Amino acid sequence: METDFSKSFTNIQKIAIFNVLLSLLSQDDKMSRDKEIKQLIQILEILNFDIWSPIIQFQVHSSFQISDDIETLNSLTKNQKEWMIVSALSVVRAGGTIGHSKQNLINNLCESLGISNDELDKIIIKMVTLQKMKRESFKGGKSINNSGCLVVLMFLVVSLVSIFFIL
């Protein structure tokens, strides 16, 4: 479903996001990679990015290099760049702990997008705060089904997007 948020990105920007996030997937651990792919799919759904669309397939396959994608990502607004970093962190964290090489990739991505270490710290604090809110909402032993989890996840994403647009 197309939302105002997903409409704020061009198809070229969505392809660049996809390519960069794809480059962050684990290459050595299949179990971690599977978890990261699931997270990537959720991000693509938020962007209303249909990877199977023939037009998208053509554009993805005709994409040149990550450096071209980074150049495209530099056209994002500050809030979109922050969302991109949160998305990148969520993909690499889905596979477990963030190792030294993944941390370097995230740092290089931030540097390429003009996001300082202080800004990255603030982004991580926002992300951790939202995760704490999510954990607190599950306290009390309440059972929640998959659709309930999806609603909570979407609430957290909408909240995160709202925070970025407010700041």
Image: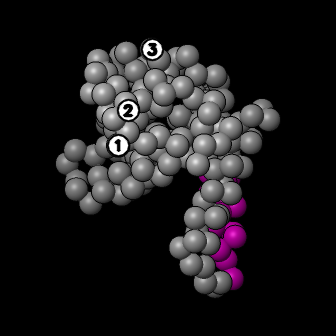
Contact between marks 2 and 1 (CB within 8 A): the answer is yes
Q: Is residue 126 magenta?
A: no
Instruction: Tell which of 69 and 112 is nearer to you.
Output: 69
Q: Give the residue number, with chain letter if any, for mark 3.
A: 71
> Is residue 148 positioned above or below 127 on the image?
below
Would you say the magenta stretch is mainly helix, strand or loop?
helix
- Per the image, the residue denoted by label 1 is 52
Q: Which residues are magenta?
A: 128-140
Disc 2 marks a residue whose amino acid type is Ile
- Colouring rule applied to residues: one colour
Q: Amino acid at mark 1?
A: Trp
State the SS at label 1: loop
Q: Residue at x 62, y 72 (%)?
A: 148
Callout 3, which amino acid?
Glu
Query: Mark 2 = which residue?
Result: 56
Question: Closer to us: mark 1 or mark 3?
Answer: 1
Establish if 91 lies above or below 5.
below
The residue at the point 46 percent across, 23 percent down is 12
